[in-house]
Amino acid sequence: MKPNNLESLWMPFTPNKTFKKDPRIIVGAKDMHFISDDGRNILDATAGLWCVNAGHGRKKIQDAVYNQIGELDYSPPFQFGHPKQFELANRLVEMFPEGMNHVFFSNSGSEAVDSALKIALAYQRARGKASKTRLIGRERGYHGVGFGGISVGGMVKNRMYFGSMLSGVDHLRHTHNPELNAFSKGLPEYGAELANDLERLVQLHDASTIAAVIVEPIAGSTGVLPPPKGYLKKLRELCTKHDILLIFDEVISAFGRMGTPTAAEFFDVTPDIICCAKALTNATIPMGATVVQDHIYQSMMEHADAPIELFHGYTYSGHPVACAAALASLDIYKEDGLFERAVDSAKHMQEVAHSLKGTKNVIDIRNMGLIAAVEIEARDGAIGARGFEVMKKAWDLGVMIRANGDTIAFSPPLIVENNQIEEMFDVTKKAIGSIN
Ligand code: PXG
């Protein structure tokens, strides 16, 4: 392919100029591997982008999608229904924490987040608390790329180019504390008290102005930050105390990444709203979902001031083909026992990941569930350069890893074998060793 042929496409979150000089092109995928255009098998240590939890090319999903297109390719989601979206909503509420019984569909994590924020605001108004309009996110949070998501998000580059965003937003402090918590296996010991930062914001703004707090139970894109022990429970208590909704953005953590259907179940903390996407359809067809507790839905049904209780929705909300892909994915997760399998693989990955302690430039290793991260020290004046070079080198050596700045993130499909976990980290170690 001539470099020219790559010019028409503006690639997302990619240095276009650099990429197009030396492209990495993927032409196929099966199970744990991608296939590159030069015919190499590349081990997928990232489940694509935290999303292909059942592994690639699953026949059951392929058949479900094919059959669905023949049976009902599309139907409008406003004023009309089709059976599979009700079936999928029922399946999801069975899996999700008790009381989370209503599902609003969208097409991505960003939309699932925007839907959650809008539901939170509309709910507060419907129940007579219209002054509760403020949204609280957290520093280093990632909630997708819509204006709602970047406003509550806390990743500087994702915000600084895009103007003033939503007004009436504030942020909790992030929980990363390498001085005390570096090389923690599983949840870090120190930092639960950082949840009290919500009290600071309540004192500043008053609870009567705050609609919701949104956090990732485990922060992913910012470089994998597991929550300190006790942090999420404390945050839940404070939200309840101040009558503030708690939203968990589970776009990466739902569907088995923690060995449970949701991280909420893993932590035994039930939020008011959960956003999910990605592995919902094993990433085959784009889909997002926002799942809410009974009290939110019931309040909207009883108190909304118009027959349409929520003025929100997407042309592709509950798309029949996405629903078919999601139902097939949920079947696979269950039939293959993949969430349980992830628990065992996570133990092995913890040991293997931490064996990289002592490798040149490695300054921290973090893990939780089937997620691990190896952080390397940034090169002077070039944050992210080492991470990028390690990612490229690993690709050359046959493993796809993800660099979030100088943190290498691992989130393999839940079907990963122990020897493949070892291969992921062996190659990463070599890649780290090969750069200066
Ligand atoms: N919330 C969270 C917690 C996410 O991780 C989104 C929302 C947005 O989802 P969509 O489907 O709109 O992209 C995400 C997405 C990375 C990386 O490098 C992770 C995501 C996206 C891009 C890169 O870890 N997660």
Image (spheres, rainbow, N blue to C red):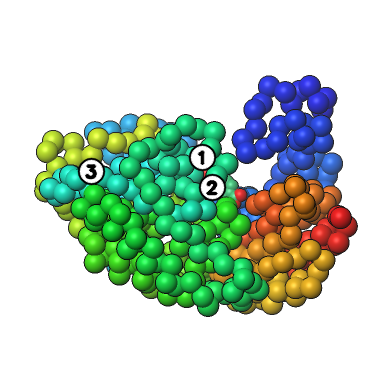
Label 3, secondary structure: give it: helix
Q: Which residue is mark 2?
A: 155
Q: Which residue is mark 3?
A: 122
Classify 10 Å Cα crowding around label 3: few (below 14), some (14-19), many (20 and above).
many
Q: Nearer the viewer, residue 282 or 320?
A: 282
Q: Amino acid at mark 2?
A: Met
CB under 8 Å between discs 2 and 1:
yes
Residue at x 30% of width, y 70% of height: 237
Label 2, secondary structure: give it: loop
Q: Quadrant of residue 359?
A: bottom right
Disc nearest the viewer among 1 and 3 = 1
Residue at x 37% of width, y 31% of height: 315
Rounded to the nearest angstrom, the CA distance separating label 1 from label 3 is 25 Å
Q: Amino acid at mark 3?
A: Ala
Q: Nearer the viewer, residue 338 or 249?
A: 249
CB under 8 Å between discs 1 and 3:
no
Q: Amino acid at mark 1?
A: Arg
Residue at x 30% of width, y 66% of height: 238
Q: Nearer the viewer, residue 278 or 243?
A: 243
Indicate which disc, 2 or 3, sits on the residue closer to the N terminus. 3
Rounded to the nearest angstrom, the CA distance separating label 2 from label 3 is 26 Å
Label 1, secondary structure: give it: helix
Q: Which residue is mark 1?
A: 159
